[in-house]
């Protein structure tokens, strides 16, 4: 069900005039680029839902001056050299599946598209690692690995859209991350082009090293603001020989959370362990209780052990037909679901956060209350989507039908939920990242650590060329 | 068998004259400190074996001007303010169990001892996390957790000596790390006092966040050169209810490595999976083959599954009496073993590196050959001590009896082995860190990433006050 963007621009979309200085410099360098209005419009947006109404009206919040299609790390370095010379910003883009505006270009800047850099460069079957260009998307990477009996195991909802560089830049999580890890666990090495043109190789010396701080982690989550990731080395595992599924219903969300906690703390980490509140259980599974779906894959001995622990810890729940897991699997990558709702006048979005088990139920209640208290809010619901030893990700969905300004309502909902999360000391984002949408909360969320992020930006991008405004550094998000 | 240092200074050790400006400034601030000769001598060394012959002769390579005993983060900040004002260096110290000179003070500088900061501040039994001061040692921390049924599971050989801050500063690994992770996997948050006096709280918002780069990882492995870690939040797990052991003998080290690889790549990660070459197997287990010892603990379902996979993958080996594991357990923390050998005229040390499975056997052979080719080298041997999906740690031991200068021989051995590791693109250190001993290899080991480490040092410690020379930044290691 690949869908490159939620909706289409009107055919008569009008762009600002072409920046001739920029176009001529790009041509001189022999870079592949476009200054076409439709191209610039497309690369001026990503999957941030706020783009849906804008697109419908033919509006782009910030028009890139040109779209550059890099074919190599050399092209990336050349683009950055040009950006330094002409003082134009650079927004690196892969599949532009960011749902928080992290891949939307800045006004007059360069949209640096890496999707032409999609080669799988090397597979080490013995070590189980793969070196890949940043623009490669999940299906192509998995196909290359599959023929060697390997998999990354990273399956985000945006699997068909997102690129490896985007996974890394946003600290992404796949739907099977309880077993395979988040992308920060999967990465071993990076090639990064810095704003000053340096071509830097980080990590990839082996599984672990104690040679100073892990500089790879400086760029995982940097959202294009500190450098351009052009290649990555990832761990690839043997494809799982065995799979099992189960489903349960709990009387309450809190009871379900407790069961998830006990499962993880008994060292079981089924690839999928998702708990839905009553609203989402009714919507997705036609059940009035709180549904848990479970899927594990891998060595049969471990999968069977995992499922035995899951069963033991779900004793107080009702066992359901495992066919519910198949129902989830069928719909799990339906990324296009939001656009028709917006087009119907609803304002809908999701907010994923993370917190420790000890305060998770209270966090869930407080965020839901804050959303439900807003005028014109129709519904707010939650599920637990990724679980760890010490806590989990809560994934909220809200929908409202504002009579007035759509963007005001949207920002109000994010403000309300985010204020609660920051006040509780929980993590403002688990895997979608900051982008432009969460930029205004970063100072409060990072607290005393915020100046360090600003200093890193100053150190690595002193001219503020890279994705300015994203991540709450380098200017106004919009 | 706690032993605070390998050997004792002569009772008549003579220190350089007291720095009155420094002493008077420390007194004015109300800090707890000493300028006593014996204290300064002690804090001028750590467990780096090169200190053994120096100590015997009553020599200290670099005398700290004073030893400050911080009682709080406030004391740390006050010490750093003084250091800025008087332009004196600061070397943060815990148990000083660094075996690479990472905790040896710089000439005339302040040795900042954190061992008085050893409080366990808070235990969250539900989330399974503990907040602890950086000077707390393993036994005290584990005792506090044990009464709540929890454990960190971090058991380095230096367990009785090392402090939490040292674990983190050096990217340490415990002997059970295959199951519990290295310290970078265990940490969730840090409190750090920066050179400019900033008091910074990093992480600890929950299990995972996608809010920019993981700034916690900037200080894990920073070896006291980028800031002073004063508190940490770590994950604590339920104490394991079940344990199993096994031992096998392989005909060759390579065959044993292959079995370890297959075990890990079938998702089994027994807490202990150590493979010894024939030399070490004879020395430790009276066996002429290559011995593997295995220990796992945790949920019985997972431990039994793990041991079944281990057994299946060790089919070509001879099963041995599991009593060999007990023999290893008894001696595993004998940190004082090296001193008597050095005092008997031998030069002995260990070198831990890491590499991918695909080149590990070749790496092992090449490092051993480089050591054995040195004149006056008596023996070089290896074991595999920590294993991952994609590779493992190789732990080499060498011993020689040089007729000439001991230090020349020692440095020659490290040069030879390190050159091979760097040339093969493997990781120069797995868990001991860089300290002063490996500082001279850092430029080559990090390659194009080295300038970034230098820039980080400049950003966080522009006056070069923090542990100068360690980690290959901020000056000559000695």
Image: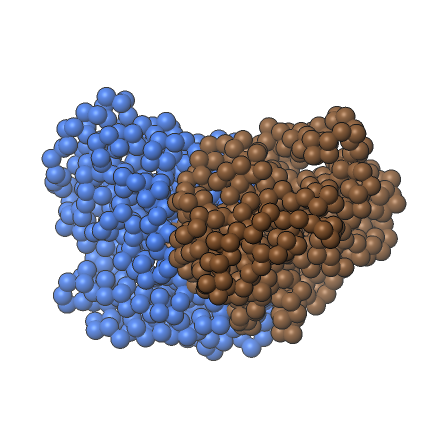
Chain colours: A blue, B brown
Query: Between B276 and B359, which is closer to the camera in this rendering?
Result: B276
Q: In the shown orientation, is residue B201 left or right of residue A389?
A: left
Please give the name of the residue rendered at 29% of the width and 43% of the height, measured from the top-left corner: A467
- Which quadrant is home to the C terminus of chain B? top right
Foreground pick, A61 / A336? A61
Whether residue A386 is visible, yes or no, is no
Residue B353 x %, y %: 64, 39
Q: Nearer the viewer, residue B156 or B385?
A: B156
Q: How many marks?
A: 0
Left or right, A116 with respect to B145, comes to left
Q: Is residue A440 above or below residue B291?
A: below
Q: Look at 23% across and 66% down and name the residue there.
A: A412
Residue B451 image point, x, y percent: 44, 35
Instruction: Work out which quarter of the rendered image holds the N terminus of chain B and state it.
Output: bottom right
Q: Residue at x 65, y 74 (%)?
A: B147
Q: Nearer the viewer, residue A269 or A13?
A: A269
Does any portion of residue B338 appear in the rendered image? Answer: yes
Residue visible at 29% across and 52% down in the picture: A472
As drawn, is B299 to the left or to the right of B226? right
Q: Quadrant of residue A166?
A: top left
Image x and y of residue B357, in percent? 64, 38
Q: Position of residue A338 (x, y in %)?
A: 29, 57
A255 versus B69 height, above or below = below
């Amino acid at each position: 069900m690949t869908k490159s963007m939620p909706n289409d621009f009107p055919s008569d979309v009008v762009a600002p005039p072409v920046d001739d200085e920029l176009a001529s410099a790009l041509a001189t360098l022999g870079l592949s680029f476009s200054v076409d209005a439709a191209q610039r419009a497309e690369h001026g947006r990503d999957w941030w839902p706020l783009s849906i109404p804008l697109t419908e009206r033919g509006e782009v919040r910030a028009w890139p001056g040109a779209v550059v299609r890099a074919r190599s790390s050399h092209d990336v370095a050349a683009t950055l050299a040009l950006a330094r010379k002409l003082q134009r910003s650079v927004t690196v883009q892969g599949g532009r599946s960011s749902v928080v505006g992290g891949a939307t270009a800045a006004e007059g800047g360069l949209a640096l598209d890496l999707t032409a850099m999609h080669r799988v460069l090397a597979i080490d079957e013995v070590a189980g690692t793969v070196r890949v260009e940043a623009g490669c998307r999940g299906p192509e990477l998995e196909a290359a690995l599959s023929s060697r009996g390997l998999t990354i195991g990273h399956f985000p909802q945006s699997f068909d859209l997102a690129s490896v560089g985007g996974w890394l830049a946003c600290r992404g999580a796949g739907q099977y991350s309880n077993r395979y890890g988040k992308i920060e666990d999967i990465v071993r090495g990076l090639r990064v082009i810095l704003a000053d043109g340096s071509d830097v190789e980080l990590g990839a010396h082996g599984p672990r090293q104690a040679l100073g701080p892990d500089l790879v982690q400086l760029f995982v989550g940097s959202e294009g603001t500190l450098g351009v990731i052009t290649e990555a080395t990832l761990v690839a595992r043997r494809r799982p020989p065995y799979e099992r599924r189960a489903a349960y219903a709990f009387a309450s969300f809190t009871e379900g959370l407790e069961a998830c906690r006990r499962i993880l703390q008994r060292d079981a980490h089924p690839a999928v362990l998702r708990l839905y509140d009553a609203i989402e259980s009714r919507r997705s599974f036609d059940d009035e209780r709180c549904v848990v779906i479970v899927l594990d894959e891998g060595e049969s001995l471990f999968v069977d052990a995992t499922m035995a622990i899951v069963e033991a810890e779900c004793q107080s729940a009702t066992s359901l037909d495992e066919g519910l897991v198949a129902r989830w699997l069928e719909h799990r990558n339906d990324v296009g679901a939001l656009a028709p709702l917006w087009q119907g006048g609803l304002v809908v979005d999701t907010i994923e956060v993370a917190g420790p088990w000890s305060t998770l139920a209270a966090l869930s209640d407080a965020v839901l209350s804050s959303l439900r208290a807003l005028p014109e809010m129709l519904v707010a619901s939650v599920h637990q989507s990724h679980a760890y030893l010490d806590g989990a990700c809560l994934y909220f969905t809200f929908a409202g039908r504002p009579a007035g300004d759509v963007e005001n309502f949207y920002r109000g909902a994010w403000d309300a939920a985010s204020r609660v999360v920051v006040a509780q000391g929980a993590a403002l984002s688990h895997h979608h990242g900051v982008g432009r949408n969460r930029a205004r909360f970063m100072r409060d969320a990072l607290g005393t650590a915020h100046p360090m992020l600003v200093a890193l930006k100053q150190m690595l991008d002193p001219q503020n060329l890279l994705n300015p405004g994203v991540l709450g550094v380098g200017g106004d998000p919009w």
